Image (cartoon, helix red, strand yellow):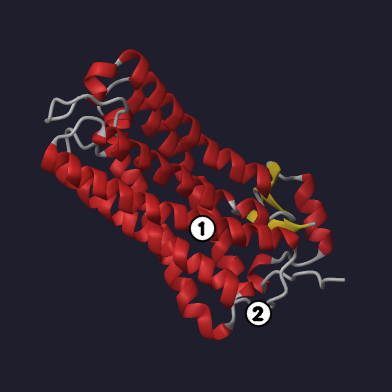
């Protein structure tokens, strides 16, 4: 039987009695799987809405490019930032999910402190820092759209791509090769496989999106920008899927909040 994982001292309650008393006074208690799913659902469904709404009601405007060739899909920038109500829906979702995303980052900080080998803690800290910057840049590129604030949007977008890719690779490495206990259970193995597959698809999609973007700008061929937009979508969806693997990493945990102890984690 696997030994029960123990929380670090700063994350544990003083006594089991305190836990019981705190649970009675908790403002809310939520299984981490549900919390993670709700967090990812905000940008996911707002993204689907923005793309669909742009195609249905702003098709000509959203798919047009400087080349004036046929195109069937809007780029992400056009879908989420160029028109209303799409921009409002996307920005609202990203703002609302920002604090929950930081909560997930905090969970991984505690997780790496507990589970990763001591001589790999610096790598874990870099991964957490990259994830923090990724979240900030996602907020920035959403609030500063490419139409009105192109220079800011470009910096946030490029930084988001770089930090998200590096974070995914480091996260996979830490979970595969730097765990104190290398014997993973079935959920942990599933999480690791998903991380690997989603990271690979994400990287390939970025390379293909870059290729089709350059080809569109250089040759103005019909349909090429559609391929660019399609692989952009894959980049976004695989990024969301990667972060959703936290469901498996924290499957036995609940988040509890009360006015005495604040937010804490409870293992079951």
Residue 66 locus on image (x, y percent): 12, 30
Q: In this view, does 78 lie above or below 95?
A: above
- Residue 144's x, y, as percent? 25, 39
Could you tell me residue 81's position as x and y percent?
Answer: 28, 31
Distance from Cα at disc 1 to Cα at disc 2: 20 Å
Residue placed most toward the observer, 35 or 259: 35
User: With respect to residue 264, does 33 lie above or below?
Assistant: above
| SS class, disc 1 | helix
Q: How packed is label 1: few (under 14 Cα within 10 Å), some, or many (20 or more)?
A: some
| Residue on which disc 1 sits | 105
**Residue at (69, 41) in percent of width and height:** 28
**Which residue is at 13% across, 25% downward?**
68
Corner quadrant of residue 60: top left
Residue 224, relative to residue 120: is it above or below? Answer: above
Residue 164: tell me if it is visible: yes
Residue to which mark 2 is pinned: 180
Judged from the image, the secondary structure of the residue bearing numbered disc 2 is loop
Can residue 261 be seen at all in this image of the molecule? no
Is 23 on the left-hand or right-hand side of 258? right
Q: Which mark's residue is nearer the viewer, 1 or 2?
A: 2
The crowding category of the residue bearing disc 2, from other C-alpha atoms within 10 Å (few below 14, some 14 to 19, many at least 20), is: some
Image quadrant for the N terminus? bottom right
Q: In this view, does 2 lie to the left or right of 113?
A: right
Q: Quadrant of residue 150?
A: top left
What residue is rendered at 71% in x and 58% in y?
Answer: 187
Q: Is residue 189 toward the left or the right of residue 199 in the image?
A: right
For the point 41% across and 65% down, the residue is 129
Using the image, determine if residue 230 lies above or below residue 19.
Answer: above
Q: Which of marks 1 and 2 is nearer the N terminus?
A: 1
């Amino acid at each position: 039987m696997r030994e029960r994982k123990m929380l670090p001292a700063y994350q544990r309650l003083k006594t089991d009695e305190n836990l019981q008393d705190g649970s009675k006074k908790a403002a809310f208690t939520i299984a981490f799987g549900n919390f993670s799913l709700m967090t990812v659902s905000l940008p996911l469904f707002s993204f689907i809405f923005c793309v669909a709404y742009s195609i249905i009601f702003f098709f000509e405007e959203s798919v047009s490019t400087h080349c004036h060739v046929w195109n069937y899909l809007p780029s992400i920038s056009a879908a989420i930032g160029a028109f209303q109500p799409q921009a409002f829906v996307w920005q609202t979702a990203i703002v609302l999910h920002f604090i929950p995303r930081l909560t997930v980052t905090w969970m991984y900080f505690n997780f790496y402190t507990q589970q990763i080998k001591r001589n790999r803690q610096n790598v874990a800290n870099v991964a957490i820092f990259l994830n923090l910057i990724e979240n900030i840049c996602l907020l920035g590129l959403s609030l500063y759209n490419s139409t009105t604030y192109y220079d800011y949007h470009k910096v946030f977008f490029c930084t988001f791509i770089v930090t998200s890719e590096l974070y995914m690779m480091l996260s996979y490495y830490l979970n595969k090769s730097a765990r104190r206990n290398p014997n993973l259970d079935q959920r942990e193995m599933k999480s690791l496989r998903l991380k690997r597959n989603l990271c690979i698809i994400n990287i390939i999609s970025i390379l293909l999106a870059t290729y089709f973007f350059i080809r569109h700008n250089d040759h103005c061929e019909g349909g090429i920008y559609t391929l660019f937009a399609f692989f952009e979508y894959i980049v976004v969806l695989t990024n969301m899927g990667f972060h959703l693997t936290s469901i498996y990493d924290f499957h036995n945990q609940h988040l509890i909040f009360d006015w005495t102890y604040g937010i804490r984690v409870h293992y079951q």
